[in-house]
Image (cartoon, grey):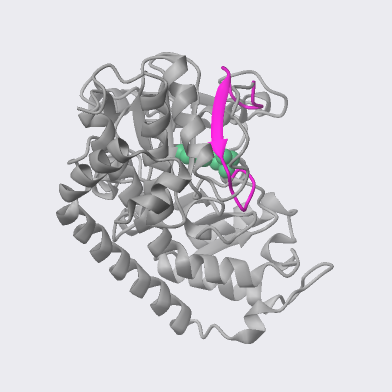
């Protein structure tokens, strides 16, 4: 590689040669990622062909959005690709948390209990559920919450789950990705086993999977292994970096109808909701998503191997199998977190000249630092890093619309730590 262009971007020769050594060791893994991307690309194209996607689908609608062909057909494409009866894919779903809140409140009624058999859910769901007090939480509507933590080795506590399921248990929520924790992310196979177990105890429990960051990482999705609903954000994987807003819920026809009634109004459901001209980005983003996810995965594995070599704990490590695009790096101090994020920011195509600062973000209970220079604000399928400023001072790194940008971001983070003298053993 021509070092000059990297030198111009601020990467020194020492960091470059360190990176090249790391990359030499990752060739085999990258071939596996490309193979999954190829399969998922075919899966998306097949769903689009089967539903006869054409130019009419890209037309804008306004007002009520009755007979919105593009919107209705996109939902068929999602359902087909994710192997579900129905789907709700809308710009009116503002983010992943909103999609999850819609799915939960569509199913749960006063007196029902929600169970998380996989430990604490994602930070923003604490207020949705009422684990942390909030106005309009499920708790305020008389819906209780139970949680079974994972065993020490990160596996499911089947005995505990069996004990926790009772006559009130109406719904189970399973978060695929680790979120802001350092537990492992679950494979689709593991999720399938958990769902089968839950349904063997109480067959009518609705199993929802928070699929954020997991889409297209494997060849199957949780909806292929028994989930009644999978839920996610379009400014993560399935938006392919092009969707400027949105969320999706895919699942059984009955669940999706309830979600649509909850999202709009009872009686209206899926028939209203103009697309406002956003359809080209939704279709094209979904088309791009498998490739974008592959680039993000390569970036995550590259980061894992770099930081492992530099002596830090990384989750997952650079050889284990991957089930989401998130890479946690335990940096052990606030200073290193800041330097890492500075590097990610400095490598961005947008806002590269700003310095990220920790702030008290709505929905999170400690200060959070975020680095992102994204075309879509806050998009975390674009190269970004964030993390709560608390033990073990872990940054969660994710995204990259292209592998080359992800690579540059990681090299730049190493560069900033190196320059600041924050690498105890230098670059080895
Ligand atoms: C990002 C994320 C959410 C919330 O999505 P937002 O779009 O940030 O509201 C929920 N669960 C998990 C696991 C996530 O990664």
In the rendered image, which quarter contains the N terminus? bottom left
* Residue 370 lies within the magenta run: yes
Given residues 145 and 33, the one toward you in this image is 33
Given residues 409 and 154, the one toward you in this image is 409
Given residues 182 and 186, the one toward you in this image is 182
* Residue 238 lies within the magenta run: no
Residue 71: give x, y in percent of width and height.
64, 71
Answer with left or right where residue 265 lies relative to residue 40: right
Residue at 40%, 25% in the rendered image: 419
Q: Is residue 405 visible?
A: yes
Residue 325: give x, y in percent of width and height.
37, 46
Q: Is residue 175 visible?
A: no
Q: Quadrant of residue 292?
A: bottom left
* 338 up-or-down from 70: above or below: above
Q: Which residues are magenta?
A: 360-378
* 59 up-or-down from 30: above or below: below
Residue located farthest toward the right when viewing the structure as drawn: 63
Given residues 152 and 402, the one toward you in this image is 402
Residue at 39%, 40% in the rendered image: 11
In the rendered image, which quarter contains the C terminus? top left
Residue 207: give x, y in percent of width and height.
42, 44
Residue 34: give x, y in percent of width and height.
27, 63
Residue at 46%, 47% in the rendered image: 8
SS assignment for the magenta stretch, majority: loop
Answer with left or right where residue 201 lies relative to residue 89: left
Residue at 66%, 85% in the rendered image: 56
């Amino acid at each position: 590689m021509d070092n000059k262009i990297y030198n111009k971007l601020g990467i020194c020769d020492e960091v470059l040669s360190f990176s090249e050594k790391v990359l030499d060791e990752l060739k085999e893994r990258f071939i596996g990622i490309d193979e999954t991307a190829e399969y998922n690309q075919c899966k998306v194209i097949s769903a689009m062909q089967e539903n006869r996607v054409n130019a009419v689908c890209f037309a804008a609608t306004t007002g009520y959005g009755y007979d919105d062909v593009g919107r209705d057909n996109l939902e068929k494409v999602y359902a087909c690709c994710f192997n579900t009866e129905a789907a709700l894919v809308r710009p009116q779903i503002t983010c992943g948390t909103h999609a999850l809140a819609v799915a939960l409140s569509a199913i749960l009624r006063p007196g029902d209990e929600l169970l998380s058999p996989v430990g604490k859910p994602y930070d923003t769901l604490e207020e949705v559920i009422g684990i942390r007090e909030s106005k309009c939480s499920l708790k305020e509507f008389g819906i209780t919450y139970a949680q079974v933590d994972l065993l020490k080795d990160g596996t499911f506590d089947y005995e505990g789950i069996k004990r926790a399921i009772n006559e009130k248990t109406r719904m189970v929520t399973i978060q695929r990705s680790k979120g802001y924790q350092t537990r492992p992310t679950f494979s689709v196979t593991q999720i399938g086993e958990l769902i089968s177990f839950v349904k063997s105890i109480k067959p009518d429990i609705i199993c929802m999977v928070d699929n954020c960051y997991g889409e297209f990482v494997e060849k199957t999705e949780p909806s292929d292994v028994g989930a009644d609903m999978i839920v996610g954000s379009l400014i993560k994987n399935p938006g392919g970096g092009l969707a400027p807003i949105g969320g999706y819920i895919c699942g059984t026809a009955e669940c999706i109808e309830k979600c649509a009634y909850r999202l709009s109004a009872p009686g209206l459901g899926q028939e209203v909701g103009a697309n406002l001209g956003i359809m080209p980005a939704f279709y094209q983003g979904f088309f791009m998503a498998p490739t974008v996810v592959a680039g993000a995965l390569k970036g995550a594995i590259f980061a894992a191997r770099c930081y492992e070599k530099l002596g830090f704990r990384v989750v997952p490590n650079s050889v284990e199998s991957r089930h989401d695009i998130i890479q946690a790096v335990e940096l052990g101090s606030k200073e290193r977190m800041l330097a890492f994020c500075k590097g990610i920011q400095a490598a961005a195509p947008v806002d590269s000249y700003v310095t990220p600062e920790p702030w008290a973000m709505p929905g999170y209970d400690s200060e959070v630092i975020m680095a992102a220079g994204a075309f879509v604000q806050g998009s975390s399928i674009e190269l970004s890093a964030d993390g709560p400023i608390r033990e073990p001072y872990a940054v969660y790194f994710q995204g990259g619309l292209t592998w080359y940008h992800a690579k540059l971001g990681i090299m730049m983070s190493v560069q900033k730590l190196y320059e600041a003298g924050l690498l105890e053993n230098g670059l080895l």
